[in-house]
Amino acid sequence: MKKYNLSILVILLISLITGSVNAQQNISQAGYYHLSIGDFEVIALSDGTVPVQAKELLNNDKKIPALLKKEFLSDTVETSINTYLIRTGKKLILLDAGSGNLFGSQFGGALIKSFEKAGFKPEDVTDILITHIHLDHTGGLSLDGKMIFPNATIHINQKETDFWKIHEKETAADSRGIFSNRQSYLNFKIYLDSGKVKTFKGDTTLFPGLSTHEYAGHTVGHTIYAIESKGKQLVFWGDLIHVAAVQFSGAEIPNEYDFDKVKAAVQRKKAYGQAAAGGYLVAADHISFPGIGHVRTAVNGYVWVPVNFGAEK
């Protein structure tokens, strides 16, 4: 059977972490940001950051150094881990749950601090929308075998749960990505075993004005979510982008942790083009916090335009 050193795998998963970037695990900033989308209130919550080596993550593509330099970045990029609260009526909906302690004590893991600073408690969450099962999206669902969001129902694409039911136990055929992300499935499985998970298939409407859209490739059931109200729209991208400085100019560049690299590239190109053509807001888990903005076309791809800052009322 193939054997792995877990500590090495965690380091590889976050793209060969180095000590050259001071990741903001302790969140000295506020850690939350409010905006309105029609009748929806959206609150971006920071789970902290993690430094990644862009060349290692993105297949050592020859375009990477110049693209990073253009954005005043080195190869080690401090990457945000963003989650989002959606408040509508009596529901408080969390989109993705951060990394918890699965990146160790130095990186990520700040979601609950951001919750508290924004005036919420984990017990307030009624529903959780999961884009996919990876460390930095479902790692924060539980800790030491206990649910962090005990009153929440989790919604997830059935393809994700079907995949991980098959891969729950270690086998000789495990890829690095499967082995490294198994604990994030186990952190999710506590809710599954408690009957607190509702799966869906393909594209559907979960709640009035809130819909799911399957963009499989990064994982087998990777799903994005959209809210629409009073002519305004916001689309939550999950892992359609990791390093904006590179991928908006090179959506075709393979990502080390894409389950299907060819299909994932097709989905990135599709999503970037749709966002630019549609002019709607996008919320991305790994674009600099709060990770909300627009996409517009450029000569060699696309450009990210961060949302204009609005002071909290």
Image: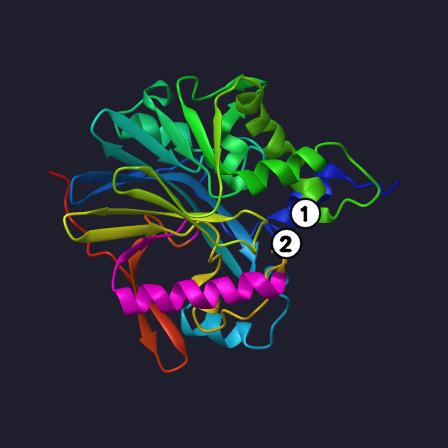
Does residue 73 sit above or below 218 in this rendering? below
Q: Viewed as shown, does residue 207 lie left or right of 174?
A: left
Q: Residues within 10 Å of mark 1 (few under 14, many from 20)?
A: some
Residue 3 has which mark?
A: none
Q: Nearer the viewer, residue 132 or 241?
A: 132
Where residue 231 appears, as percent x and y from the top left, is: 16, 53
- How many numbered discs sit on the rendered protein? 2
Query: How many other residues sit within 10 Å of disc 2, few (<14), some (14-19) or many (≥20)?
Result: some
Q: Give residue 264's quadrant in the image.
A: bottom right
Range of the magenta residues? 261-286
Where residue 164 appears, x then y in whole percent?
65, 37
In front of the other: label 2 or label 1? 2
Whether residue 294 appears in magenta in the rendering, the answer is no
Disc 2/disc 1 C-alpha distance (Å): 8 Å
**Residue picked out by circle 2:** 259
Residue annotated with mark 1:
177
Left or right: residue 187 compared with residue 272: right
Q: Is residue 37 left or right of residue 182?
A: left
Q: Main secondary structure of the magenta part?
A: helix
On the image, the x and y values in percent for residue 133 come to 56, 40
